[in-house]
Amino acid sequence: MKQGALLGGSASDRHLLEDALKHLHESEYAGTSATLASLAGALSIPLEQAGLLLEELLQTKLANPSGTSVQLTDAGRDEARRIVRAHRVYETYLARETGIRADEFHRHADAAEHRLTPEAVDALADRLGRPRYDPHGDPIPTRDGNLPPRRGVSPLEMPDGSHALVLHLEDEPASVFRAAASAGILAGSRLHILGRRNGCLRVSVENRECELPQAVASALEVEPCDPPPPMRPLSSLTKGESASIIYLSPTLGGGERRRILDLGLVPGTIIRREFDSMLGTPTAYQVRGTTIALRREQADRIFVEL
């Protein structure tokens, strides 16, 4: 299907209609009802304008009324997943190949999704190795429009003492995303649920304890996992000490992560601390017979076992 093939009007009108389709799709995928009020809230527009959008979606047979809610038709679902695919593939591109901050991915992808053709999205996906999930852990619809069922639960539902793998971190509102990211929690992070205190969820992530406000914990979707092996940050090695790399923090992203991998710092690699610079950072390490330099903030996010 060509870009916006079922949606006419000006570019701004089409963008709003595509955003409306995305909201209906997100509601359907989450198992909640999309209503006039929810659409107005999601798009930050007056109820009257939301009503006009829904009327056009009904007239173009992209949506059908269902009691007090609105549901996508098959054609509407196909169109919505085209937009979702463009958004998530572009976010993956931003994460892997640019230096843009993670909390900016969503804003840039929101703009790109409306101008990228399906052919351009497919070419970008091929270039990226046909990723299945975006940086936030959301599944990327295939070029045929297939999407796996939703999985994962809130960490608030996990019992104390359990271990969980973060599958998804909601990227809106941006303030909540930034709070989780600043605690070192992104899709792919492992949490140890420690307990509850003062309305917050106490967790351990990468050997650090922190308290997550309920709004932040609610933005996460997790699944149970096995406890990770005992590990320590690479920066904790003493001069001449060797260890095996077992884990790279998800907070190592974009070009920085590519550089780390290009240097051969992959799980299973043996690394030895050689010497520090006069100022204490960077530190020289030996990997596969080659001496490399890492800053302290990089070595803090590479984990090893002796």
Image (cartoon, grey):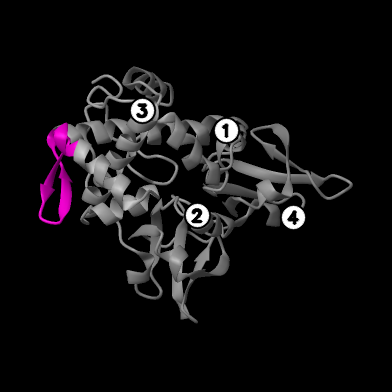
Q: Is residue 231 left or right of residue 67?
A: right
Q: Label 1, label 3: how many angstroms apart (C-alpha)?
A: 17 Å
For the record, the magenta segment spans 57-74
Q: Earlier in the sequence, mark 2 or mark 3?
A: 3
State yes or no: discs 2 and 1 in contact (Cβ < 8 Å). no
Q: Is disc 4 surrounded by few (<14), some (14 to 19) or many (20+) residues within 10 Å?
A: few
State yes or no: discs 4 and 2 in contact (Cβ < 8 Å). no
The residue singled out by tag 4 in the image is 238
The residue singled out by tag 3 in the image is 130
Q: Label 2, label 3: how many angstroms apart (C-alpha)?
A: 25 Å
Mark 4: amino acid: Thr
Mark 1: amino acid: Arg
**Quadrant of the rendering where the C terminus is positioned:** bottom right
> Could you tell me which secondary element the residue under label 4 belongs to?
loop
> Could you tell me which secondary element the residue under label 2 belongs to?
helix
Mark 2: amino acid: Phe
The residue singled out by tag 2 in the image is 177
Q: Label 4, label 3: how many angstroms apart (C-alpha)?
A: 41 Å
